[in-house]
Image (cartoon, coloured by chain):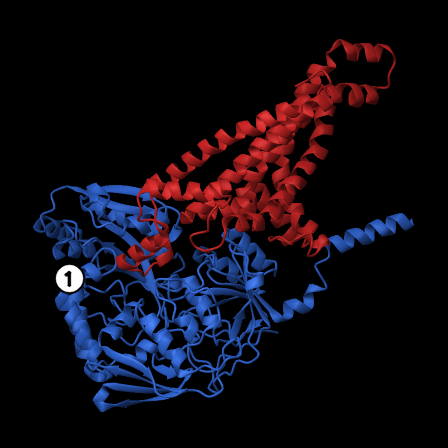
Chain colours: A blue, B red
Amino acid sequence: MKRIIQIAALFLAFIAPGVVQAQDRATTLRVVVHANLQILDPVWTTAFITNRHGYLIYDTLYGMNSRFEPQPQMAEGHEVLEDGLLYRIRLREGLRFHDGSPVRAQDAVASLRRWMTRDAMGQRMGSVTSGIEAVDERTFEIRLRERWGLVIETLGKASNPAFIMPERIANTPSSTQVTETIGSGPFIFVRDEWRPGNRVVYRRNPDYVPRAEPADYMSGGKRPLMERIEWLYIPDQNTALAALNAGEIDYYEAPPLDFITSLERNRNVRIVNIDTLGTQGLIRPNHLSPPFNDPRARQALAHLVRQEDYMRVVVGNPRLYQRFCGAFFQCGSANDTAVGSEPYQQPNIERARELLREAGYNGERIVVMQPTDRPQYNAATAVLIQSLRRAGVNVDVQAMDWSTLLSRRANRSPPDQGGYHLFITTHGGPDTAAPVSNTWFNSRCERANPGWACDMELDGMVAEWARESDPAARRPILERIHRRAWETLPYIPFGQYTQPIAVRSNVHGIVAAGLPVYWNIEKR
Amino acid sequence: MWSYAIRRILATIPVLCVVAIIVFLLLRLSPGDPAAIIAGDNATVDDIAMIRAQLGLDRPLLQQFVFWLGQLLSGDFGNSIYLARPVIGLIMERVEPTLALSVTTMAFAMLLAIPMGVLAAWRAGSWVDQTIMALSVLAFSVPVFLIGYGLVIGFSLTLDLLPVQGFVSLSDDPLQFLRHLVLPTIALGLVYSALLARITRATMLETLNEDFIRTARAKGLAEPRVLLLHALKNASVPIVTTIGTGLALLIGGVVVTESVFAIPGIGRLTIEAVLQRDYPVIQGVILVIAAVYVFVNLAIDLAYPLLDPRIRF
């Protein structure tokens, strides 16, 4: 009998969930992230996962609020002097890096200089900046060559922002990865527990001084309430969903969109929309390759797009997408306008055929790159292929993985020598919502993103918009930009949708910041 | 035997050299560019070119190969392109989960399959034999991921007995280590059990028809003794070969199981490296797996004389 009891006790101990772990679980937030964190330097790469890592351990001078107005974050405030040519920024008192050293103006200066050599919007600001210098330990100045109305917006932008690092680290050339991970943000990176491809661990920064204002988008008080954040990389979506349903994880950053409805039925799980702007899908023609070097061929492409067809296969759930969004700078943003999109609200295959003929298209092979390992892009590309074929286009579908597509899309050669005609991608967040920071909108020819949109007249309008600091005066410029963009089409938007997160129902305090942030979150 | 072992070890050198050359060329000639992936979705072509130059990927192929070979000869597998950490360290981090899963899978398969195979051979042609063989065909035919999801739904989500995913190191918590291995072991072990059961049955059937078995039975030996001591021992050479080869295959081939149960092992390291074109990691892993394969085969060969004294080197 005693033996039986011993065996039963052993079995119970084996199958019982770890009681000892219960205490840890209350103070630990276990998150399934969308990608494997491998690169720790948020200046060196534009990868989303590294950007999110950056927000945990670093802080920014300014942060956007939910009305997309930059608010002081590390900065106490600023003065604009000399008719808009000098910005004097003062840091908050009491800020410290994770190694205990105080945050100084010299750190901010070095960080900005490094960031401005890599980030697209930083580079634009750099082109009108004559110098950035520290005035004292807490004050520094940005001196401009010409007026530029977006200095504070640029410092407060949400994607690939200017994270502030200690001066000795920020002095690393931007072509080299930094090896240390010391910031002044609300959480500290625990390097000893980092297992690439599996787990990333952060612990609460006990010395972090949050702002007094309530958290609002990327601005306000960033209160680190969880003792520990664990990022888990679980590439299999079914496993991640099972782990969420079983309560092994608390937070699923990017649940598959076609599972949202079934997740909503689970009382222990909540679906939260943190992305008030959403993601925009886009078809990118190669502007170097005929016929798409002719705007009429790009207009033909736009005439073939029925956004709802794309959204149905990419998203599925109609509550998560808009039937039509004619805004390049995102519907619902401060720069939302549909001016110029009127001819494209319904597809017009006949008009598309006419325009293709006018552009000189005569049945040549059109190379479409289809990334088969990205379900959403794969599905959208299938819709694109079908619509092209309907218009009589001779489509050459080239299936490949995303890695191959990333490298191939940078190839400027003609399509029969390793180049291409079309591919699909997505972008989102506040950066997409402004002409100057929307990188796929950038039409600066060789200096544009792959696909090399080339319209210097459009670029001139964007520069004019950027120089103007009065929002009311910017509006007519914006509308001119938009009308022009729907004529020359740097890319063709195929819809806007939101990617919600899924959390266990005991997770509270989630900040709708456009992307997952972990301050203010607690488990009750 | 020692001279045989040394000869075999020396013979692995050209094998590994050929593997190294083929892997290097296959990777560099296949499409994809790690610089483009590192740079991120919003990177410009100039960003990508700068990273490519920094990583040395813009150098001629021969120069890259000579550099890598030089590193390899000095015992250095190089650094991961993404993590800037030594490849050998990354592999070592992943060895424990994969080795643990491989060993428990093989143990499970042996415990299940060998008695089943013996039983099927002993009762050849009966309903017992047919049932065991039908089950083994089924286990061999159902994909591992399907068995895995089924187990997760049953034992984790419905009964709440075992964890869905993850791995805990033996040194951190032995109990959790075992709990996390149960489902992946069953999922993967069923496939190997099926294979092993069929091999055991086939070799046992052959052995049971031998004259010495007939003699043993004629002498009045008990049936279990005939089966286990006389028949199974003599049938063990092909079974041990299958177990050894299976173990080597498991170490290099548990990608699906590791993905379904989110186990951070060598399989996942390989697949992630392939998807991201992390050349040094892929090259390092393949060389290590090739070496493991060669040495496991050598160990099996060296074990033969222990099982069958008629075999000599």
Quadrant holding the C terminus of chain B? top right
How many labels sit on residues?
A: 1
* Amino acid type of the residue tagged 1 in the rendering: Thr
Residue sitting at 22 percent across and 84 percent down? A472
Residue B74: percent from left, percent from top:
49, 43
Q: Disc 1 sits on a residue from what chain?
A: A
Residue drawn at (29%, 72%) of the image: A122
Q: Quadrant of residue B309?
A: top right
Say whether residue A192 is left or right of residue A218. Answer: right
B215 up-or-down from A242: above or below = above
Name the image quarter holding the N terminus of chain B.
top right
Quarter of image, res A454: bottom left
The residue where tag 1 is placed is A488
Task: Report helix, strand or loop for mark 1.
Answer: helix
Horizontally, is B69 left or right of A365 in the view? Answer: right
Residue sitting at x 70%, y 60%: A18
